[in-house]
Amino acid sequence: PTVNACLDSFGEDRVVFGGDWPVCTLGASLSEWVAALRQIVHNRPEIQQEKLFHLNAKRLYNLE
């Protein structure tokens, strides 16, 4: 899947989850999209998953 290619190409510190809400809900609910993405990245280290889903956005948007 594309997300794994992005993580491999750009590195775990340069990829941020984006849900494309509300457009993504045309095919499934947002929670279903998140669950699908979690399944795709489940073999990656926990820290990479945390960076993808929230730590990178927190850092980039200076939300600390």
Image (cartoon, rainbow, N blue to C red):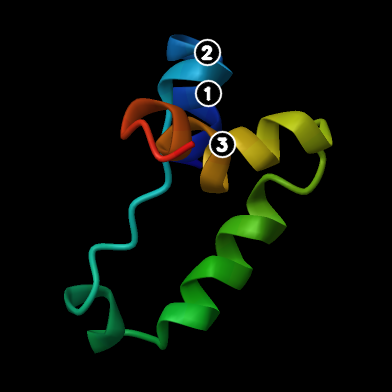
Residue where numbered disc 3 is placed:
55
The x, y position of residue 60, in whole percent, is: 35, 27
Residue drawn at (42%, 19%) of the image: 14
Residue drawn at (68%, 45%) of the image: 41
Residue where numbered disc 2 is placed:
11
Camera-side residue of 61 and 47: 61
Name the mark nearer the viewer: 2 or 3: 3
The x, y position of residue 52, in whole percent, is: 54, 38
Q: Amino acid at mark 2?
A: Gly
* First-in-chain label (2 vs 3): 2
Q: CA distance from mark 2 to mark 1?
A: 5 Å
* First-in-chain label (3 vs 1): 1
Q: Is residue 16 above or below residue 9?
A: below
Within 10 Å of disc 2 (Cα), the crowding (few <14, some 14-19, many 20+) is: few
Q: CA distance from mark 2 to mark 3?
A: 14 Å
Residue where numbered disc 1 is placed:
7
Q: Amino acid at mark 1?
A: Leu
Is disc 3 placed on a helix, strand or loop? helix
Q: Amino acid at mark 3?
A: Leu
